[in-house]
Image: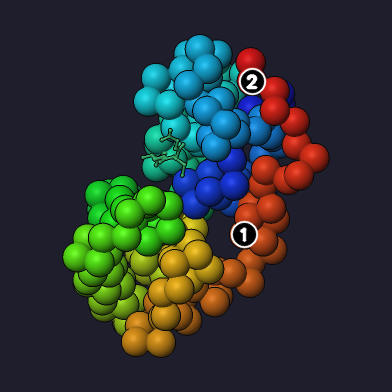
Amino acid sequence: MTPIQLYSYQTPNGHKASIMLEETGLPYVVHVVDIEKGDQFRPEFLALNPNNKIPVIVDPDRSRTVFESGAILLYLADRSGVLKPANDIEAGLTLQWMLFQAGHVGPTLGQLWNYKIFAAERLPQVIARFERETARILRVLDGQLEPRPYLVGDLFGVADVMTWPWINAAVSKLDVDLGQYPNVARWFAEIAARPAVQRGLRVPAHDDQETLP
Ligand SMILES: N[C@@H](CCC(=O)N[C@@H](CS)C(=O)NCC(=O)O)C(=O)O
């Protein structure tokens, strides 16, 4: 198989794709898109994703280009048969929790990151609003994870791959304490121990090249 081409950067959304590629064992090559330098606005990259965001994958053998991390994870699950929902009910629940990530977890933590870390002006009311929303989302996840080990049931799946990198960012970059969310804390630690997750977190590595198409 021709390796999948991954366009990514060291961020939670980038980690979703690299963790999934590591979980599947599919061969892949990494292209660094330095979003701090503005590579995502280069015409070569916009030809892959007009929305100027990583991650993107290209599967040369199938002539497919996929952007949006959730679409990438579902594509790779289909392509490899790994972490694929076992039946229609699981597929529906997987989509539900992936959309919860895309609609709530990522945007809320992304805004918290922006206003807490990057914003030139400190706006306490805005930070408090996104901290409250973060707590609400963590309560939702904690409830879902109370009676089951993973978001959709007994098995680790793409909904977990979609969500975990943002909880990782919350803990490691935003000082979010999982102490009040014991089920999320247990789920977070178990997934952190997976070798494929640890490898995926190191992508892109320092020596990966900036090679846009
Ligand atoms: N909904 C998108 C979000 C992707 C995203 O926000 N990527 C960020 C890095 S984590 C990015 O490329 N930002 C560059 C920019 O907005 O210019 C997905 O899930 O793939």
On the rendered structure, is 50 left or right of 156?
left
Ligand 1: give its quadrant: top left
Q: Which mark is residue 9?
A: none
Is the CB atom of the residue marked by disc 2 within 8 angstroms of ligand 1's nearest atom?
Answer: no
Q: Could you say where residue 64 lies in the image, as x and y percent from the top left?
A: 51, 20
| Picture layout, residue 135 above or below residue 31 | below
Q: Residues within 10 Å of mark 2 (few under 14, many from 20)?
A: some
Q: Is residue 95 visible?
A: no
| Picture layout, residue 167 above or below residue 76 | below
Badge 2 amino acid: Leu
- The residue positioned 49% from the left and 35% from the top of the image is 54
Q: Residues within 10 Å of mark 1 (few under 14, many from 20)?
A: many
Q: Nearer the viewer, residue 194 or 168?
A: 168
Number of the front mark, 2 or 1: 2
Q: Nearer the viewer, residue 112 or 145?
A: 112
Q: Which mark is residue 212?
A: 2
Please tell me which of labels 2 and 1 falls first in the chain.
Answer: 1
Q: Is residue 174 visible?
A: yes
Mark 1 secondary-structure assignment = helix
On the rendered structure, is 188 left or right of 199?
left
Mark 2 → mark 1, Cα distance in angstroms? 25 Å
Q: Could you say where residue 97 lies in the image, as x and y percent from the top left?
A: 30, 56
Badge 1 amino acid: Val
Q: Nearer the viewer, residue 69 or 209?
A: 209
- The residue positioned 49% from the left and 52% from the top of the image is 12
Q: Nearer the viewer, residue 117 or 54?
A: 117
- The residue positioned 67% from the left and 43% from the top of the image is 204
Number of marks: 2
Q: Pointer 1: what residue? A: 197
